[in-house]
Image: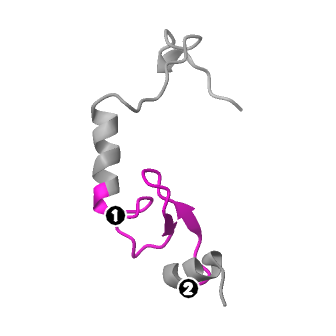
Amino acid sequence: MTTNDDADQKRLGAGSKVIECPSCNKPVAWVTENEYRPFCSERCRILDLGAWASGNRYIPDDEEHSDVMSGQVSPEE
């Protein structure tokens, strides 16, 4: 008898890195053959894009650096 993890590894490809789909949390093999990676399907990819487009997902503003222009930042050595 195999565990769910063993069954997932067989289904997803033994030895491949397995991640969770950002939309539905299903296991996804991180392989080049997966055209929707990191998502499990086109549906999850489109749902995520819609969330970004509607403003439900965003990169939070950093108030400390919001008024700094790229030319004002000195490169770290």
Of the 4 image quadrants, the one containing the C terminus is top right
Name the secondary structure under disc 2: helix
Name the secondary structure under disc 1: loop
The residue at the far front in this view is 1
Residue contact at pointers 1 and 2, CB within 8 angstroms? no
The x and y percentages for residue 72 are 54, 14
Which residue is drawn at the image coordinates 41% and 59% (left, top)?
Answer: 39
The residue at the far right in this view is 77
The amino acid beneath tag 1 is: Ser
Which label's residue is closer to the chain start, 1 or 2? 2
Q: Is residue 2 above or below residue 71?
A: below
Which residue is drawn at the image coordinates 63% and 81% (left, top)?
Answer: 6
Q: Nearer the viewer, residue 39 or 33?
A: 39
Residue 5 found in image quarter: bottom right
The x and y percentages for residue 75 are 62, 27
Pointer 2 local density, CA inside 10 Å: few below 14, some 14–19, many at least 20? few
The amino acid beneath tag 2 is: Lys
Magenta stretch mostly in which secondary structure? loop
In the rendered structure, find residue 10 and report the number of the disc placed on it: 2
In magenta segment, residue 36: yes
The x and y percentages for residue 20 are 53, 59
Q: Nearer the viewer, residue 61 or 49?
A: 49
How many numbered markers are drawn?
Answer: 2
Q: Is residue 49 above or below residue 62?
A: below
Q: Which residue is mark 1?
A: 41
56 vs 4, left or right, is: left
Of the 4 image quadrants, the one containing the N terminus is bottom right
The x and y percentages for residue 46 are 28, 50
Which residue is drawn at the image coordinates 47% and 15% (left, top)?
Answer: 69
In magenta segment, residue 56: no
Region in magenta: 14-43
